[in-house]
Image (spheres, rainbow, N blue to C red):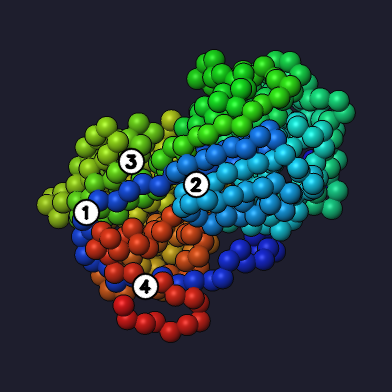
Amino acid sequence: MADAKPFYWEDRPEPVAPEVFTIEGGRPLSGTVPISGAKNAALKLMAAATLTGERCRFTNVPEIEDVRVMAETLRDLGVVVDHPEPNVYEVASGDVEWLFVPLEAAAKMRASFMLLGPLLSRFGRVIISNPGGDRIGRRPVDLHVDAMRAMGAQIDYRNGYFFATAPGRLRGSEVRFPTVTVMGTENAILAATLAEGHSVIRPAAREPETDDLIAFLRKMGADVERTYADTIEVNGKRRLRGAEHAVIPDRIEAGTFVVAAAVTGGTVRLERAPCDHLGAFLEIAERVGVGITCGTDTIDVDGTPLLDGGYRAADVETAPYPGLATDLQPPTGVLLSQATGTSNVHETIFEDRLEWLGELRKMGADVRLIDEHHAAIAGPSRLSGAEVEIGDLRAGASLMLAALAATGTTTIHGAHHVHRGYENIQRKFQDLGARIERRAEGTPVTTS
Ligand code: EPU
């Protein structure tokens, strides 16, 4: 990997046509919002379907850009991907013609690298583009590659591509990660399901999406089990079969809507919401003063304390699951901008994930960026409409939250990034009473 020279987001083609959101804020959101299936589960399930030639069927798949890109990437390999009705995808990988995942796929979506493990393990070879870094950090893939090498793969890196072969079958082995990696863990699991012999993966990611992948693999006939909180063991099988699976709900989308209610002083019920998967985040929301009530599969959010005494500052630190998800750090930052006092934010996972706070500052937030991992947010700030730009989907959704809380009109450029990971976000906010206009970049505002 020493010669691996990643390229960066700026070198990539735009994934989809640039869009703009115009949001008129300052009104409390109220009502009920359904939570969609989890992006970071669905993408891995679709990759896992390539482990068998039989048909796999997924329900509760979110209708988002990243899923569309994964479907397209699979089709380019010769995999049949059907989309018979909304939120349902069927994947049949009987005839994989190309064991080649090109730069175009990797440039659009890092999760295309999830095809390394299953294709290598099933077909014994694959050529796959280095997904490189993106706007939240450097994000190398060395740990994925090391895991495959530990299982006997030979991998060369040339001209931005990994050329991977597994003479004979991959061999089950002990995969030891120096740090917790979600997709690294998942790639290792997928490779191990068809490897010869026993694999032990540790420290393994504990994310609910990783467990959802394990649940699906077991339905496919894989012998995979989380034997300790941070250990996953796999006994490789010669073949796996097709299976059906419903994707778990998206905890990050749910957390985003919790903050939407909280910062607008609204009251919102989240339906099909994964309270159990949001422990650390909900604990922070409650500490800040947001009213949270968990039902069987609902979360009721009461943001009225914002108007009645206000919220309290809290120091927060992101961590692998079960800690506060780095994907929820940006929404949490918006919440903290409305709390009284100074909150310290420690982003432990990615290097560039606090940068978006510069955009929040344009809206009137009192933000101090201390270094790439630390920031201080003082509040409460009166946010007001501004012209802002987003670079990644979580920052994008969070600027929408800030715009909903702000007085006046906010124009958000780069809005298309949000569609990578949030199903119908504009409609969902509108159904809660938000005023949002969506248009192509460069076209005039129309009144709805
Ligand atoms: N890392 C390495 N080498 C590797 C892999 C990771 O150094 O080979 C480092 C990363 O740079 C990072 C840390 O390890 O500092 C953890 O990264 P991880 O591998 O866990 O991240 P990931 O698997 O690439 C997934 C999610 C991200 C989420 C992170 C952390 C998917 C498709 N993506 O990424 O989600 O932020 O885990 O929880 O599952 C998002 O949905 O917006 C998103 C970015």
Q: Residues within 10 Å of mark 4 (few under 14, many from 20)?
A: some
Point out residue 156 in the picture as x, y percentages from the top left corner.
85, 40
- Local packing at callout 3 (Cα closer than 10 Å; few below 14, some 14-19, many 20+) is many
Q: Which quadrant of the view contains residue 94?
A: top right
- Give the residue at x 52% y 51%: 84
Q: Quadrant of the N terminus?
A: top right
Residue closer to the observer: 183 or 306: 183
Q: Residue at x 50, y 55 (%)?
A: 64
Q: What is the distance, in whole Å, between disc 1 and disc 3 at their CAs? A: 14 Å
Tell us which disc is closer to us: 2 or 1: 2
Judged from the image, the secondary structure of the residue bearing numbered disc 1 is strand
Query: Residue 437: percent from the left, percent from the top?
Result: 36, 73
In this rendering, the label closer to the viewer, 2 or 3 = 2
**Mark 1 or mark 3: whose residue is earlier in sequence:** 1
Q: Amino acid at mark 4?
A: Glu
Q: Gap between marks 2 and 1, in whole Å?
A: 26 Å
Disc 1 within 8 angstroms of ligand 1 (CB): no
Q: Which residue is mark 3?
A: 272
Judging by the rendered image, the residue that carries numbered circle 1 is: 31
Observer-nearest residue: 268 or 8? 268
Residue at disc 4, secondary structure: strand
Query: What x and y, as percent, mark residue 83?
Result: 55, 51
